[in-house]
Image (cartoon, grey):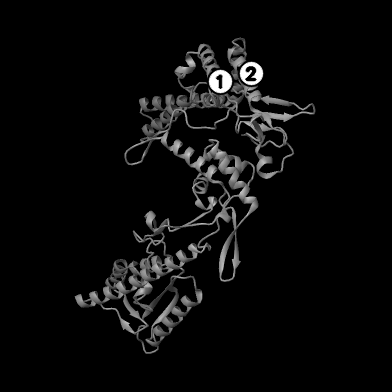
C-alpha cells in the first residue's frame, strides 16, 4: 500500500534482442522500468524477463518468454501490467505473436508499449486488425533481413571467403576485412586417411573406433561419431569445391532453428583447388562404395530401413584392417607402389598417414594372404582339435560363470527360506490364527519365489553339439579358400580380428595371430552363425 492507502500496482517487464547484445536488452529494461515508475507501478527484479540473442521467430526455446507466459497464467497473478518496447519484442512471427499477446490480455494483464505510451487494446475487431498489421510488418522485416544476410553470405562464398564455422582440416585466417581458409596439414592427413580407409570398405563405426582408440583429435568437443564421419565423407570442400546454400532457414512449429534442404538450383558452388585435400579419384571411389553399401540395405518405398544385408560390404583385400604392424600396433593397409613388376604389399597405415612409425617395409600381399589361409584351413580340417577346443571352451565358460554359480547357491537358499515361510503362513491361515493381511503376505512371498525360480532355470553348464562344431569348421574352411570378401567373413566368424606382422633382422617377417572359436562352440550367446555356403564354394 502507498502512503495515501492506495494499492501500488505491480508491473512486469519483457525485453528481447535477436543479436546477442546485453547492453541493448539492458537499455530496454531501464526504459521500461522508468515508464513503470512514471505511472506509479512497482517492478520486482523477479518479474523482469529477458531473452538475449534469440530470434523473434523462436517460441519454444526462449527461456524469458516461457517464464513470462507461465507467470501470466499462474494464480494468483504476480503482476497487473506488462511493459515492453513494442509488439515486435514479443516476437516477429505474425500469428504466434498475436496469440501470445491475446493470451496475456485475456489473462487480465494490461500491456503497455513504452515506445509510444499506448496500451494494447484487443476488445474490437479493428484493434485486432491493427495488431495483426504491426506483427505482419515485424515478420516482413525479419524476412528482409534474412534475405539480405543470405545474399551477403552468398557473395562471400563466391569470393571463396569463409561464411560459417571452421571445417575440420582447415584453419581460418583473417585477411583484411574477411576470413579465408588454409589447409591444416595434421588434420588434412587424418582426412585423407579416413577417405582411404572408407574406400577400402571399412564402415563408419569401425573407422570411428579406430580413430578413438588412437586418440586422434576430432572435430568438436564430442569426439568422433558415425554422424561426424557421414558428414565428413560428403563434404565437397575436401575436393576443392566450396558449396553454399545447401540448406536454408525454415522457421516452423515455433522453432527458428529448423532448416530444410534447398533446391540444387539455389546452391552456389565455387572451385577452389588450392583447398583440395582429397583427389577426385579417391573422392569418387568413396562415393561409389557408399552408394553400393546403401544398395545392400533393404528399404520400404518411404525409405524406412527394413533389414541389414546378410553379408555387408567390406574391404577388398583379405587383411586390410585385420593385419597389424608389430612395431606400432597400427593397421596394415594394402597399397600397390612403383612399377608393374613391383609386387602389391600391405604397409603400416600409421607410417603412411602420420609418419610416426619406423616400419617402412611392405609385406607381400600374396604371401601373407596365403600363409593365413593355409593356417586357418589346416585348423578347420583338424578334427582332433575339436574336442580340446570344446574342453577349453567349457573351462572358460565355467570360469566366466563362477560368480553365477555362487549366486545360484544363494538363490536356492533364499527360495527354501521363502517356501518355509509360505508353509507357516498357510498353516496359520488354516488354523484361523492369522491376521487379516496374511493373504497379501503369502502372495508377496510366492511372487519372490517365482522370480527366483526363473533364475534357477538358467543353465549353468555349457552344452556343445560336437557335430555342429565340426560342420561349422568345415564350412569356415571352405569360405577361407573363397574370394577375399567371403574369406574375411569367415575370419570374423572364426574370431580372427588381429594378425600381427613384425619385420625381423633377417629381412623377413614374424606372423602371429589368434583364432577365437567361441562363436562356433556357442560360448557367445546370440552370436550369428555362419551364412549358407555360396554355390561356387560348395562345389569346390
Outermost residue on the left side: it is 125
Quadrant of the image occupied by residue 55:
bottom left
Side of 101 relative to 176 (left or right):
left
Lower position in the chain sequence, tag 1 or tag 2: 2
Q: Nearer the viewer, residue 419 or 211?
A: 211
* Position in image of residue 306 (x %, y %): 37, 35
* Position in image of residue 294 (x %, y %): 43, 38
Q: Nearer the viewer, residue 266 or 405?
A: 266
Q: Gap between marks 1 and 2, in whole Å?
A: 10 Å
Assign the N terminus to one quadrant of the image: bottom left
Q: Nearer the viewer, residue 217 or 4?
A: 217
* Position in image of residue 534 (x %, y %): 46, 19
Mark 2 highlights which residue? 375
Mark 1 highlights which residue? 480
Residue, x 33% and y 71% (percent of image)? 140
Q: Is residue 460 visible?
A: no
Amino acid at each position: 500500500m502507498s502512503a495515501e492507502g492506495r494499492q501500488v500496482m505491480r508491473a512486469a517487464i519483457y525485453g528481447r534482442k535477436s543479436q546477442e547484445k546485453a547492453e541493448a536488452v539492458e537499455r530496454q529494461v531501464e526504459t521500461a522500468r522508468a515508464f513503470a515508475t512514471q505511472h506509479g507501478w512497482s517492478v520486482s527484479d523477479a518479474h523482469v524477463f529477458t531473452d538475449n540473442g534469440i530470434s523473434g521467430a523462436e517460441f519454444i526455446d526462449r527461456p524469458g518468454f516461457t517464464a513470462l507466459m507461465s507467470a501470466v497464467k499462474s494464480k494468483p497473478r504476480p503482476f497487473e501490467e506488462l511493459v515492453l518496447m513494442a509488439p515486435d519484442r514479443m516476437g516477429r512471427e505474425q500469428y504466434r505473436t498475436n496469440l501470445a499477446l491475446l493470451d496475456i490480455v485475456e489473462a487480465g494483464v494490461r500491456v503497455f508499449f513504452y515506445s509510444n505510451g499506448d496500451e494494447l487494446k484487443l476488445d474490437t475487431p479493428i484493434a485486432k486488425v491493427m495488431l495483426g498489421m504491426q506483427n505482419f510488418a515485424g515478420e516482413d522485416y525479419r524476412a528482409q533481413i534474412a534475405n539480405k544476410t543470405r545474399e551477403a553470405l552468398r557473395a562471400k562464398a563466391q569470393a571463396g571467403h569463409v561464411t560459417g564455422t571452421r571445417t575440420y582440416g582447415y584453419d581460418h585466417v583473417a585477411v583484411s576485412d574477411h576470413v579465408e581458409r588454409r589447409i591444416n596439414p595434421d588434420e588434412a592427413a587424418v582426412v585423407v586417411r579416413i577417405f582411404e580407409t572408407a574406400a577400402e570398405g571399412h564402415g563408419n563405426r569401425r573407422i570411428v573406433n579406430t580413430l578413438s582408440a588412437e586418440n586422434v583429435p576430432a572435430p568438436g568437443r564430442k569426439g568422433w561419431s558415425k554422424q561426424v564421419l557421414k558428414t565428413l565423407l560428403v563434404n565437397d570442400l575436401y575436393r576443392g569445391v566450396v558449396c553454399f546454400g545447401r540448406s536454408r532457414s525454415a522457421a516452423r512449429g515455433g522453432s527458428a532453428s529448423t532448416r530444410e534442404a534447398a533446391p540444387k538450383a539455389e546452391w552456389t558452388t565455387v572451385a577452389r583447388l588450392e583447398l583440395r585435400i582429397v583427389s577426385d579419384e579417391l573422392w569418387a571411389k568413396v562415393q561409389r562404395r557408399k552408394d553400393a553399401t546403401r544398395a545392400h540395405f533393404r528399404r520400404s518405398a518411404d525409405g524406412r530401413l527394413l533389414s541389414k544385408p546378410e553379408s555387408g560390404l567390406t574391404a577388398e583385400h583379405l587383411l586390410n584392417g585385420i593385419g597389424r604392424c608389430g612395431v606400432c600396433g597400427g593397421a596394415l593397409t594394402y597399397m600397390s607402389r612403383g612399377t608393374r613388376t613391383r609386387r602389391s604389399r600391405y604397409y603400416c597405415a600409421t607410417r603412411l598417414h602420420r609418419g610416426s612409425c619406423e616400419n617402412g617395409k611392405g609385406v607381400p600381399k600374396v604371401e601373407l594372404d596365403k600363409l593365413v589361409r593355409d593356417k586357418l584351413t589346416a585348423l578347420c580340417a583338424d578334427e582332433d582339435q575339436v574336442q580340446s577346443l570344446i574342453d577349453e571352451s567349457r573351462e572358460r565358460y565355467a570360469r566366466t560363470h563362477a560368480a553365477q554359480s555362487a549366486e545360484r547357491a544363494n538363490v536356492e537358499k533364499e527360495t527354501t527360506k521363502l517356501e518355509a515361510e509360505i508353509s507357516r503362513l498357510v498353516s496359520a491361515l488354516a488354523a484361523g490364527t492369522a491376521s487379516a493381511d496374511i493373504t497379501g503376505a503369502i502372495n508377496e512371498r510366492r511372487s519372490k519365489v517365482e522370480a527366483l525360480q526363473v533364475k534357477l532355470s538358467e543353465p549353468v553348464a555349457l552344452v556343445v553339439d560336437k557335430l555342429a562344431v565340426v560342420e561349422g569348421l568345415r564350412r569356415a574352411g571352405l569360405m577361407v579358400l573363397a574370394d577375399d570378401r567371403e574369406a574375411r567373413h569367415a575370419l570374423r566368424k572364426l574370431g580372427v580380428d588381429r594378425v600381427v606382422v613384425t619385420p625381423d633382422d633377417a629381412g623377413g617377417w614374424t606372423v602371429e595371430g589368434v583364432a577365437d572359436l567361441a562363436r562356433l562352440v556357442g560360448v557367445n550367446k546370440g552370436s550369428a552363425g555362419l551364412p549358407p555356403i555360396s554355390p561356387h564354394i560348395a562345389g569346390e
